[in-house]
Image: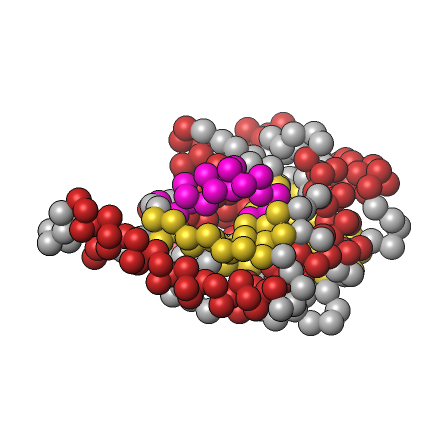
Amino acid sequence: MGVSKILVVIDPKRDNRILLERSRRLAIIYDASVELYIAAYSSAIEGSHWFDKEGLNSAHAGYIHAKQAWLANLVESLEAEGVKATGYVEWAKPLHRAVLERADCTDTSLILKQADHHSVMVKALFTNTDWHLIRESKTPLLFVHENEWGSHLSVAAAVDPLHIHSKPEDLDDKLLQSAHDLACKLPAELHVVHVYEPIPTGAIAEFDAVIADYEFYREKVRSRHRESLDELLKRNVESTTIVHFEEGIPERVLPHVVNESGIDIIVMGAVSRSGLDKIFIGSTAERVLDNLMCDILILK
């Protein structure tokens, strides 16, 4: 994964210390520049009936100027660490659209954003900025969790070599190559995770009637997945890579494996979807986003 320009989404209402440290470290290892970006917006100003058009424009300008002055301190802190950094503030809403447009016009290679946590009710009923970015961004996304990086890091790639979830055939190669490159540069220990899911017995009556020997079927599925995984590994990584090969529902098993293994960054793929599938199903990345305790790098 080549990285030359990093766009960091700054929220003035949050503690951005971890986000800035991630951007500093990534900028150094990839020799990349950083732009700290704020999509400024105030519903109190925008909805005020006291301003005419000229007054509203003036209020916007004053609000943006205040954010620019605040952001300048963060830019200076990165420059003091030897990072080529700039800051940019604009009046924009919604956030995901502003971020994507800014990324496009600045030839951004990587977008960094703090991971937002959402309740089950919110996730079930509403989309949010994170989901929009996952679905619509053509640029790699790194969602940063508020965890300090220690001296010993681990990077994992979540792969699906049989493309059960309709992923393009070359996406897993891209995930592994990017994870391997990142692990070499940090440096970090490289892990590969593949969770496969055979149809559970009793789930479909017709299936059980056809497959009389379920354990035989289960072993055949396991062998097929293992062979495909081994071929993928042979093409992309060294034999010293730590491999997690697990049976189960990916959105349940994957977070358990990653969290128990102390992974610091997981590299995942996301596939653009449309229609009802996009609204109600989403990608595996969306379904595990809130349950992973590490940073999540998402590639298309």
Residue 116 lies in the magenta-colored region: no
Q: Is residue 53 above or below residue 80?
A: above
Tell me what residue is drawn at x 51 percent, y 66 percent.
Answer: 74
In which quarter of the view is residue 81 placed?
A: bottom right
Residue 118, percent from left and from top: 40, 57
Q: Is residue 48 visible?
A: yes
Q: Which residue of the protein is positioned furthest toward the left in this rendering? A: 50
- In the displayed orientation, state which residue is furthest to the right: 239
Q: Quadrant of the N terminus?
A: top right
Residue at image location 54% in from the left, 41% down from the top = 106
Quadrant of the rendering where the C terminus is positioned: top right
* Residue at the image position 68 percent from the left and 39 percent from the top: 160
| Whole-percent x, y for residue 150 in the image | 69, 72
Q: What colouring does the structure picture have?
A: secondary structure
Secondary structure mostly seen in the magenta stretch: helix
106 to the left or right of 216: left
Q: Quadrant of residue 171?
A: top right
Q: Nearer the viewer, residue 208 or 299?
A: 299
Residue range of the region highlighted in magenta in the rendering: 94-111
Decide which of 289, 55 is in the foreground and name it: 55
Is residue 252 among the parts visible in the rendering? no
Viewer-proximal residue among 92 and 286: 92
Residue 271 position, x and y percent, is: 56, 35
Question: Is 101 a magenta residue?
Answer: yes
In this image, 43 relative to 10: left or right?
A: left
Residue 143 coordinates in the image, percent (x, y): 54, 54
- Asked where in the image residue 43 lies, by quadrant, the reply is bottom left
